[in-house]
Amino acid sequence: MEPIIRFSGADILNGENVVIYGLDMAIHPGDFVYIVGKVGTGKTSIIRTMTAENRLLTGEGTVCGFNLRGIRTKDIPMLRRRLGVVFQDFQLLMDRSVEANLEFVLRATGWKDRRAIDGRITEVLESVGMGTKAHKMPHQLSGGEQQRIAIARALLNSPAVIIADEPTGNLDGETADGILKLLRKLNEGGTAIVMVTHNRSIFERYPGRVFSCSEEHCEEVFEDNTFDLDLTI
C-alpha cells in the first residue's frame, strides 16, 4: 500500500533554518501517528512542510501524490483540499454561523450546488455529534464544541488524512478525551490521523505510532521506548 505521506532524507525548515535533519517517515492509509517532542523541536514545522506552507529543499517528500520538492504555487490549493487540518485554536470565522463557516470552505474548494452543500454540511456535523449546532455562532459554543466543528470542517472534502496540531491543547482533560475518542472513531473508519502533541498521557491512553523530535532529528520510537521520552517543556 502506497504511503499517503512520505519523507526520505528530508531537511525540515523553519523559515531559513533547518530544525530537523534527514527526516524519514512513511504514513499509510489508516495509520494513527503522533509527532511528539518538547516545544521548539520542529513538530509544527513538519506539519507545515506537509501542507506546503514550509518549503522542502533537501531530500524527498510526497503528500497525497504531490511532490513537495518544487511543487508549483498553483498546485498547493489542490494539495490542501486533500488534507483535513485541525488547529489548537480552532480558527473558526467568528462573524458567521457554524453552517456559514462550513459553506465558506465548500464554496472555496469548488462546490456550487446548494443541495449538495447543505447535505454535506449536515453529514459532517452529524458525524462529529454537532448535528443541532448548524445555526449557532462560534462564541455560543464551548471550546470542545468549537473543536468538533473544526474537525467537521476538516472532513468536508473527505480527506485521506487529518493533520491535527495540538488539537486538545486549549481544552480541559474531559473535553480533550472526547476529542481523542472522536479522532479514533474517524481513524477506525479508515482516515489516517497525524497528531502533534507534547501530552504524554494522550498517546499512552490512545496508542499509535510515535515519532519523537529532539536534537534536530525526528525518529520513530516503539512501544518499549515511549515511556522514556522526555517531553518536559
Image: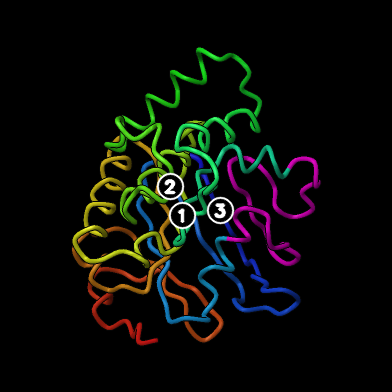
Q: CA distance from mark 1 to mark 3?
A: 27 Å
Among the two numbered marks 1 and 3 on one chain, the one whose residue lies closer to the N terminus: 3
Q: Residue at 75% across / 40% down in the picture?
A: 75
Quickly name the residue at label 2. Answer: 138
Using the image as rendered, state which of residue 137 and residue 198 is in the foreground.
137
Q: Are marks 2 and 1 in contact (CB under 8 Å)?
A: yes
Residue 182, numbered label: none
Label 1 Cα crowd, 10 Å radius (few <14 / some 14-19 / many 20+): many
Q: Is residue 113 left or right of residue 124?
A: right
**Residue 176, picture quadrant:** bottom left
Q: Is residue 21 left or right of residue 190?
A: right
Queried whether the magenta region covers residue 202, the answer comes back as no
Q: Nearer the viewer, mark 2 or mark 1?
A: 2
Residue named by callout 3: 6
Give the vertical position of 120 relative to 181 (above or below). Answer: above
Calculate the distance from the C-alpha at mark 2 to the C-alpha at mark 1. 10 Å
Tell me the magenta residue range: 48-75
